Amino acid sequence: MSLHITPEMCEAMYGFLLTTPPFRSWYRQKKLPSSDEVAFHVIASKLIRGDHELTPEGETIIRISAGLVETVSELHATMAHEMIHTYLAVACPGDRAAHGWRFWRAASCVCRHHMLSEKAF
Ligand SMILES: [Zn+2]
């Protein structure tokens, strides 16, 4: 049986992760918005688990796919992944490499703290 992901679950997961390292320190450095400053959308993609967008107006949007994210563990890993993109969009705005060295350096730290597999990340 799969979890039917909702925007409220996404917001709750994001808010929870903000209380954990390394997101907590990124949030304190104002490099991550609070959960009520992010628009959470659930999409049905079978191609991507999630994505992130920082609009020209400065709004952060995180989309999670209910087509591929079906468990709390998958929501945890996918939200953590998108939060790294959100962090880097603020911390390194000129970096256009979606999964470049900065991403993997941050992902390594997140995976170590959260016992997530970098291979599946
Ligand atoms: Zn990514």
Image (cartoon, rainbow, N blue to C red):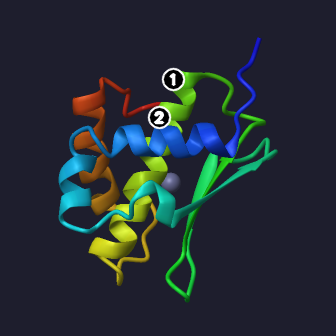
Q: Secondary structure at mark 1?
A: helix
| Extreme residue toward the bottom, this view | 56
| Extreme residue toward the front, this view | 36
Question: Do tag 1 and tag 2 residues touch (Cβ < 8 Å)?
Answer: yes
For label 1, count other residues whose C-alpha is less than 10 Å away and answer few (under 14), some (14-19) or many (20+).
few
Please tell me how many numbered marks the rendered image carries.
Answer: 2
Left/right of residue 3 with respect to residue 114 in the rendered view: right
Q: Name the spot of residue 64 as percent of width and height, x first.
A: 65, 46
Three-letter residue code for mark 2: Ala
- Residue plotted at (49% across, 59% down): 36
Left/right of residue 56 with respect to residue 7 in the rendered view: left
Q: Name the spot of residue 32 as percent of width and height, x first.
A: 34, 63
- Say which quadrant the N terminus sits in: top right
**Residue 82 got which mark?**
none
Q: From the Cβ of disc 2, is ligand 1 less than 8 Å away?
A: no
Q: Which residue is mark 1?
A: 73
Instruction: State whether residue 7 is above or below residue 72.
Output: below
Instruction: State whether residue 96 is above or below residue 9.
Output: below
- Say which quadrant the C terminus sits in: top left
Choose between 27 and 116: the one closer to the eye. Answer: 27
- Residue plotted at (30% across, 34% down): 111
- Residue plotted at (29% across, 60% down): 101
User: Residue 90's image quarter?
Assistant: bottom left
Choose between 27 and 76: the one closer to the eye. Answer: 27
- Residue plotted at (24% across, 51% down): 105
Three-letter residue code for mark 1: Ser
Left/right of residue 26 with respect to residue 50 in the rendered view: left
Q: Secondary structure at mark 2?
A: helix
Q: Name the spot of residue 23 as percent of width and height, x first.
A: 27, 48
- Structural distance between the alpha carbons of marks 1 and 2: 6 Å
Q: Which residue is mark 2?
A: 77
Choose between 28 and 78: the one closer to the eye. Answer: 28
